[in-house]
Image (cartoon, rainbow, N blue to C red):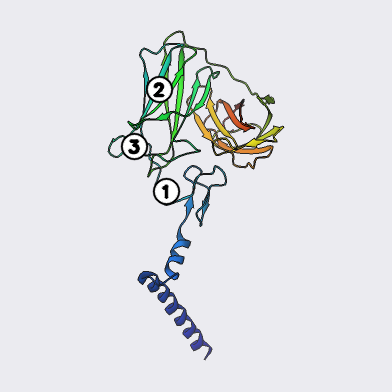
Amino acid sequence: MLTDNLRTSRRQLLLAAAALTVSGRIGLPGIGSALRAQELVYQCPMDRDVRSNVAGKCPRCGMTLVAGIPQPVEFPMDLEVTPKPVKVGQKQTLTFTVHDPENDKQVEHYQIVHEKLFHMFAVSADLDFFLHVHPQYGDDHKFRYETVFPRPGLYRILGDFYPEGATPQLNAKSVIVPGTPMSVPKLKKDYSPKQMTNMKVNITTYPTEPIAGIETRIFLHLEESEGMELYLGAWAHMLAASDDLIDLIHSHPFVADGGPELQFNVFFAREHVYRVWFQFQKKGVVNTAYFDIPVIELK
């Protein structure tokens, strides 16, 4: 009798499950849609390890969580600098054009990332020139920014943008300004506290000697942090550049709440010294500081 009861209970459970499946297909209110909603996974387009079963905002960078993010595909970015030839001290217009990799058509629609359609970073070969700005979007669907290159030599230009229907992109280009090239620096470890415009920042890392290919945790402590504000939708922005300008990394805090403590989790690619810039906003003032972080190979 007990066996018969178990069989009956199992049969009832199977019938109930079948009924739920059918009800979802024929549209009985609530049941099928609720089951499908539970299957959705929402991810942050930028920090893809941030996942949720409900829609909302990324707690790390503030971007809207999206269901069904496509696989990453690189979108080619062209950079034109005018007028030519490029000259030191001359106002230059940087024009960015993005193409769809499937059909080579110019991309016309973009998602906002951290309050802007396009973020541009520029770093000089001697690592003394640093720029984080936002080119203007034109009626021809191109982005433009005017700047002046202060010295001859190599500059790396990083574009950060998000084509509609794709994933966030980081695309780097090089600009060479004619003349005697600037010297490449020989960086050494520099974790010394940095005084910025209206606050001071200290740094530690774990491990104390970062290792290429292994996660490095960067801990920042802000002195006089009262009055901290979100800067472009995040509590801080980070750009890391290897001393040969091959590696460029743009990231945001893994842990931050507007208080004095912040944490970044970073994977450095190679054994090099990286100059790492951090930007914060306090009482309407954008503060920028950098540290030099040596990265070693795994022994």
Q: Nearer the viewer, residue 53 or 191?
A: 53
Q: Amino acid at mark 3?
A: Glu
Q: Amino acid at mark 1?
A: Ile
Q: Nearer the viewer, residue 129 or 214?
A: 129
Q: Residue at position x 36%, y 12% from top?
A: 85
Residue 215 showing in the rendered view: no
Read off the residue under disc 2. Answer: 94
> In the displayed structure, would residue 207 be above or below residue 190?
below
Residue 131 showing in the rendered view: yes
Read off the residue under disc 3. Answer: 108
> In the displayed structure, would residue 13 be above or below residue 297?
below
Asked if marks 2 and 1 touch (Cβ < 8 Å), the reply is: no
Read off the residue under disc 1. Answer: 69
Q: Residue at position x 45%, y 70% from top?
A: 31
Looking at marks 3 and 2 on the same chain, the residue that comes earlier in the sequence is marked by: 2
> In the displayed structure, does residue 116 sit left or right of residue 191?
left
Percent coordinates x, y for residue 6 in the rendering: 50, 84
Secondary structure beneath dot 2 equals strand
Percent coordinates x, y for residue 89 in the rendering: 46, 11
Q: Report crowding for label 2: few under 14, some 14 to 19, many 20 or more residues within 10 A (C-alpha).
A: some
How far is disc 1 from disc 3 in space, using C-alphas? Answer: 19 Å
Rendering quarter of residue 142: top left
Q: Amino acid at mark 2?
A: Leu
Q: Nearer the viewer, residue 293 or 126?
A: 126
